[in-house]
Image (tube, rainbow, N blue to C red):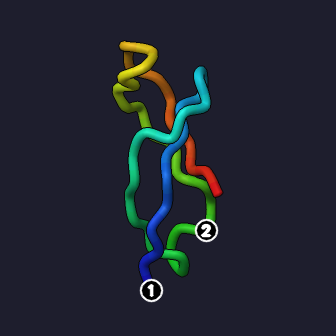
Amino acid sequence: MREIITLQCGECKRRNYTSTRNKKTKTEKLETSKFCPSCRKHTAHKEAK
């Protein structure tokens, strides 16, 4: 079963993106490099609750 997650910027802590992940196969938190519009640069975005 896939669940909807939000991705939070590592620098400004704003929640910019939403994504889905499979709970059964991916148990660790998702972390990707995305563009943050408020920081105006690419930063690490981590999964937020």
The residue lying at 49 percent from left, 46 percent from top is 7
Q: Earlier in the sequence, mark 1 or mark 2?
A: 1
Residue 16: x and y in percent read 43, 39
Label 1 crowd bin: few (<14), some (14–19), many (20+), radius 10 Å = few
Residue 48: x and y in percent read 61, 51
Task: Please identify, in this view, whether the residue under mark 1 or under mark 2 is nearer the observer.
Answer: 1
Disc on res. 28: none
Residue 44: x and y in percent read 50, 29
State the separation of the CA atoms marked 1 and 2. Answer: 12 Å
Residue corresponding to mark 2: 27
**Quarter holding residue 35:** top left
Residue corresponding to mark 1: 1
Label 2 crowd bin: few (<14), some (14–19), many (20+), radius 10 Å = few
The residue lying at 49 percent from left, 53 percent from top is 6
Q: How many marks?
A: 2
Secondary structure category for the residue under label 1: loop
The residue lying at 60 percent from left, 21 percent from top is 11
